[in-house]
Image: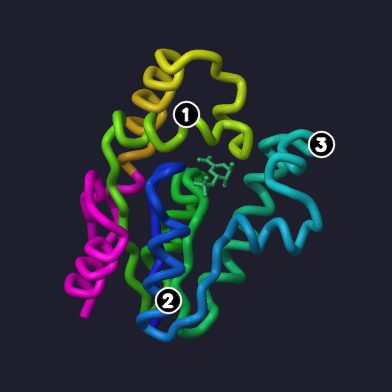
Amino acid sequence: MNIILIGYMGSGKSTIGKKLSQILDFEYVDLDNYIEEKEKNTISGIFKTKGEIYFRKIEKKYLEEVLILPNSVISLGGGTPSYGDNMKLITEVEDSKSVYLKASIPQLVMRLKDEKNKRPLISHLKSEEQLVEFIGKHLFERSVFYNQSNVTLSVDNKSVNSIVEEVILQLF
Ligand code: S3P
């Protein structure tokens, strides 16, 4: 069985994914890291040198590869579910469950404001106000995809351990 973690940038997909995989004794796969290894470049580097359209193309290709790995917890990129038919692939892959880690706009702003450099889509935003506006609009557009997940979990003000516990309770 596979568990696929979905959510906006900064929603905790990687932290939760790592912990969950340890507890379940599953492999842990982070799609962004997988892409960086395969492409021998960072995500920011790929955006800078090849552009977002190229990134979305290879993101889909590598998504198809990771979805069929056995017994894995897979953290996707924040944008993965919202391009092409990716969400269809995610929901239709056999023996897997998708979990949307749902964080509110204020929580996302708090988590992302000091981490903009690692994230090419928000690195250009200067003020916190701009970040609030950007995330609000972007999250609204993406929610239609995120909400197709098998399970939705609110993560605001919860510890990593309690989120992991809730995921396990919901899935098993
Ligand atoms: C993106 C999110 C990033 C990464 C890329 C694009 C997005 O992943 O895939 O920078 O479109 O939201 P994280 O959600 O792990 O930051």
Name which residue type carries label 2. Answer: Ser
* Label 3 C-beta lies within 8 Å of the nearest ligand 1 atom: no
Disc 3 or 2, which lies upstream in sequence?
2
27 over 61 or under it: above or below: below
- Please name whichever residue, 135 or 69, is drawn nearer the observer in this view of the structure: 135
**C-alpha span from label 3 to label 1:** 24 Å
10 Å neighbourhood of mark 1: few (<14), some, or many (≥20)? some
10 Å neighbourhood of mark 3: few (<14), some, or many (≥20)? few
Q: Nearer the viewer, mark 3 or mark 1?
A: 1
Disc 3 or 1, which lies upstream in sequence?
3
Q: Secondary structure at mark 3?
A: helix
x 71%, y 37%: residue: 47
10 Å neighbourhood of mark 2: few (<14), some, or many (≥20)? some
**Mark 3, residue position:** 49
The label on residue 113 is 1
x 20%, y 66%: residue: 166
The label on residue 21 is 2
Q: Secondary structure at mark 1?
A: loop
Name which residue type carries label 3. Answer: Thr
Query: Which picture quadrant has residue 110?
Result: top left
Instruction: State if disc 1 and disc 3 touch (CB < 8 Å).
Output: no
- Please name whichever residue, 111 or 153, is drawn nearer the observer in this view of the structure: 111
Which residues, given as a range, are shown in magenta? 145-172
Which quarter of the rendered picture does the C terminus lie within?
Answer: bottom left
Query: Which picture quadrant has residue 34?
Result: bottom right
Disc 2 or 1, which lies upstream in sequence?
2
37 over 54 or under it: above or below: below
Name which residue type carries label 1. Answer: Lys
Q: Secondary structure at mark 2?
A: helix
